[in-house]
Image (cartoon, helix red, strand yellow):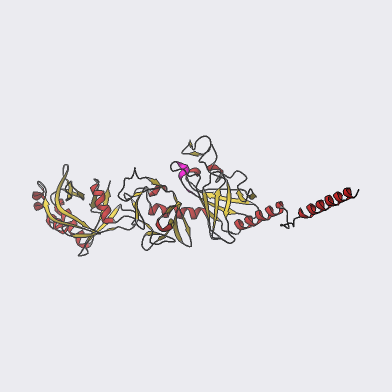
């Protein structure tokens, strides 16, 4: 009997101990559902806290070609009535401004997620299998451009200038930048487009240059916004690397931000660049010594001629007073003989001599050339020892002022861009005596 009683007491004590050991202090004062709702409310209020809205740098996928490779600016304003107004102007809106207002919410799915939970024509078009560009369905296997309409809210600080989202399905990052109250979405996009077309015009003949410390690269096809970065002296095709970018504006300044940061030496990176209007150059925001710029004008001038292109001087081109007087004397000299003087072309021959060709017309187009010795030193080119080619001597001696014009070109010129350094369609040659001419690029 005593044994039974002892065993019973031991069991009772063990059960009592187990019961006490299993009682843990409640670590949370609120339920999981309440906490999730609070989190949703916090992130909702942070999106609503920008009355002017946000500009979203939206990349559908990590593609390197096709419409999925492009970045798109989406303007968004999150309203307190749980509606969101989204605006855009791109190929998917048929290159005109379009906006749509639909519901939105912050849901919780292993963390806060921004969900455009009703069809918004400016968001869902990127994942719509029936999306059209130029009347052609885009995308493969019914995925449209392949974009997201739900975004994990990776970093959304209180009163922050930037938010960072991540596509829930595709995994591409979307940065949101706060824009001032009263910003007109359509006007903002027009300003970005005008700046982009000015700095990276489609018809610019030149490459651009990325200087990231010891790493120097040429940049081709910047106007596409998915340009090719390749080694400066490398091969444009063999060394091709595509780096999409978008341009935004804040505090009155324009910024170029690459989708993917360049990983550089000493753990440095290069991703976002501020445009310096005074110097006409982009400077990396954390490392201003890292730049994106136009090419050296003299080097590009030589490079283009080496590759078979020419530069042209027309009567309508800008010139200094002295050069204009010399040109007009030649023009009148031809005119007195009932001949129309058309233009002057500059090119390099196979022996690296500069050929200056005068084109004129009477009954048919005729050309004569003068050969100059040519050298380049940094920003300067030197033409010397003019030598008429074939029968050019007879024409030069018979046209008033033509010999003086030929002699005036035998000098050293500083080569500079004519305005926008990113667009070398025109260049300016300035002599030591401050005489100058503007030349046009001929493809």
The answer to whether one can see residue 230 in this image is yes
Q: Pinpoint residue 224: horizontal percent, then vertical percent.
A: 40, 47
Identified at 40% across, 56% down, the residue is 265
Farthest right residue? 1
Q: Is residue 279 left or right of residue 138?
A: left
Q: Examine the structure image and report whether residue 39 is included in the region drawn in magenta.
A: no
Q: Which residues are magenta?
A: 61-72
| Nearer-the-camera pick, 219 or 318 | 219
Q: Pinpoint residue 299: horizontal percent, then vertical percent.
A: 26, 54
Identified at 24% across, 52% down, the residue is 302
Q: Is residue 379 left or right of residue 185?
A: left
Identified at 44% across, 58% down, the residue is 254
Q: Is residue 396 left or right of residue 231?
A: left
Q: Examine the structure image and report whether residue 65 is included in the region drawn in magenta.
A: yes
Q: Pinpoint residue 276: horizontal percent, then vertical percent.
A: 40, 61
Q: Is residue 101 above or below residue 276?
A: above
On the image, which quarter does residue 439 sit in? bottom left
Q: Is residue 83 left or right of residue 334?
A: right
Q: Pinpoint residue 311: horizontal percent, then vertical percent.
A: 24, 50
The answer to whether one can see residue 343 in this image is no
| Nearer-the-camera pick, 129 or 203 | 129
Q: Identify the main secondary structure in magenta.
A: loop
């Amino acid at each position: 009997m005593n044994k039974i009683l002892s065993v019973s007491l031991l069991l009772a004590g063990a059960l009592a101990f187990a019961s006490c050991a299993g009682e843990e202090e409640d670590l949370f004062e609120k339920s999981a559902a309440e906490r999730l709702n609070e989190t949703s409310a916090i992130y909702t209020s942070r999106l609503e806290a920008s009355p002017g809205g946000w500009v979203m740098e939206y990349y559908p996928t990590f593609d390197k070609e096709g419409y999925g490779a492009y970045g798109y600016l989406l303007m968004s304003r999150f309203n307190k009535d749980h509606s969101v107004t989204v605006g855009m102007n791109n190929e998917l809106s048929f290159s005109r401004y379009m906006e749509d207002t639909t519901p939105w919410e912050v849901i919780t799915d292993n963390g806060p997620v921004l969900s455009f939970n009703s069809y918004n024509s400016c968001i869902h078009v990127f994942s719509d299998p029936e999306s059209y560009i130029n009347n052609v369905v885009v995308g493969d296997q019914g995925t449209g451009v392949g974009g997201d309409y739900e975004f994990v809210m990776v970093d959304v600080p209180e009163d922050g200038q930037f938010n960072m989202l991540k596509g829930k399905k595709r995994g591409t990052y979307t940065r949101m930048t706060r824009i001032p109250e009263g910003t007109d979405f359509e006007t903002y996009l027009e300003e970005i487009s005008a700046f982009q077309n000015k700095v990276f015009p489609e018809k610019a003949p030149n490459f651009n240059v990325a200087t990231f410390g010891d790493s120097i690269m040429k940049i081709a096809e910047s106007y596409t916004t998915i340009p090719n970065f390749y080694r400066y002296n490398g091969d444009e095709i063999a060394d091709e690397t595509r780096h999409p970018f978008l341009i935004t504006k804040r505090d009155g300044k324009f910024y170029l931000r690459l989708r993917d940061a360049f990983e550089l030496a000493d753990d440095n990176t290069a991703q976002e660049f501020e445009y310096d209007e005074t110097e006409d150059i982009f400077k990396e925001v954390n490392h201003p010594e890292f730049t994106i710029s136009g090419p050296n004008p003299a080097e590009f001038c030589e490079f283009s001629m080496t590759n078979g292109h020419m530069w042209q001087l027309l009567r309508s081109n800008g010139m200094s007073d002295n050069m204009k007087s010399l040109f007009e004397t030649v023009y009148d000299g031809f005119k007195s003989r009932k001949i129309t003087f058309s233009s002057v072309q500059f090119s390099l021959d196979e022996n690296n001599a500069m050929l200056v060709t005068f084109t004129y017309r009477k009954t048919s187009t005729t050309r004569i050339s003068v050969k100059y010795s040519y050298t380049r030193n940094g920003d300067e080119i030197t033409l010397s020892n003019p030598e008429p080619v074939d029968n050019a001597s007879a024409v030069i001696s018979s046209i008033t002022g033509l010999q003086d014009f030929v002699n005036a070109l035998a000098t050293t010129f500083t080569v500079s861009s004519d305005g926008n350094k990113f667009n070398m369609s025109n260049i300016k040659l300035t002599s030591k005596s401050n005489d100058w001419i503007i030349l046009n690029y001929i493809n």
